[in-house]
Image: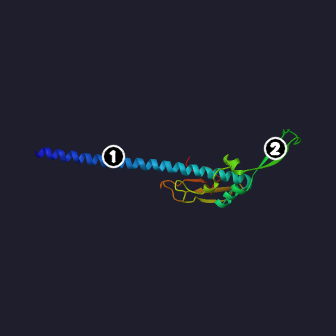
Amino acid sequence: MSNRIVIIILLALNIVVGYLIFHSVKKDVDYTNQVRIIDLQVIDRLKEVQKAQLGYKDTKGKFADNFDSLIHFYKFEKYMEVRSIGDLDKDSLAGLEVDTVFSNPLEKVFGNANYDIETIELVPPMDTAKFIISAGFIEKNDVKVPVFEVVDPHPFNKDRTLKVGSMKEAIYSGNWK
């Protein structure tokens, strides 16, 4: 009879330990999935900021050092594009016409004139925190090169802070690649 009690107690302990192990592993897997989902949302927004900054630079010759300037450009200003029309002859510029075209920057950069530029500074998924943005110039081979950096101020994944650009190098890509 005492053997049966011991067996029942050990069986119950095995079930409890098995459940605790399962719950612990499931919790880690759920957290990893949540980190991946949130990181993908932040990366998508940083890619939008990257596009916006590159479009801003195409017209202004420098990157925006704050989101107010960036948003103002896309809401109220025009995207400037220089186009050459005609054939470029090897020895002459005759027949080549240069024209400046102004267009809606949202349409030109994002392909959508209704893109909600107001939310570009907000960190997903909650859209309450704002990205940290900085811009300036660095000197590379005696040439001033415009640079920018946009950083997630409160990364969900504590092992890696997502950012795009760099203030130390002329790199305009993100650190997630």
Residue drawn where x is 21% and y is 44% of the image = 11
* Mark 2 residue crowding within 10 angstroms, few (<14) / some (14–19) / many (20+): few
* Mark 1 residue crowding within 10 angstroms, few (<14) / some (14–19) / many (20+): few
Q: Is residue 16 visible?
A: yes
Quarter residue 7 falls in: top left
Q: Is residue 66 visible?
A: no
Amino acid type of the residue tagged 2 in the rendering: Ser
Q: Position of residue 127 (x, y in %)?
A: 55, 57
Q: Which mark is residue 84?
A: 2
Left or right: 84, with 174 as reference point: right
Q: Position of residue 109 (x, y in %)?
A: 68, 48
Residue position for label 1: 22
Q: Secondary structure at mark 1?
A: helix
Question: Are the residues at dot 2 and dot 1 in contact (C-beta closer than 8 Å)?
Answer: no
Q: Position of residue 159 (x, y in %)?
A: 48, 54
Q: Position of residue 112 (x, y in %)?
A: 67, 47
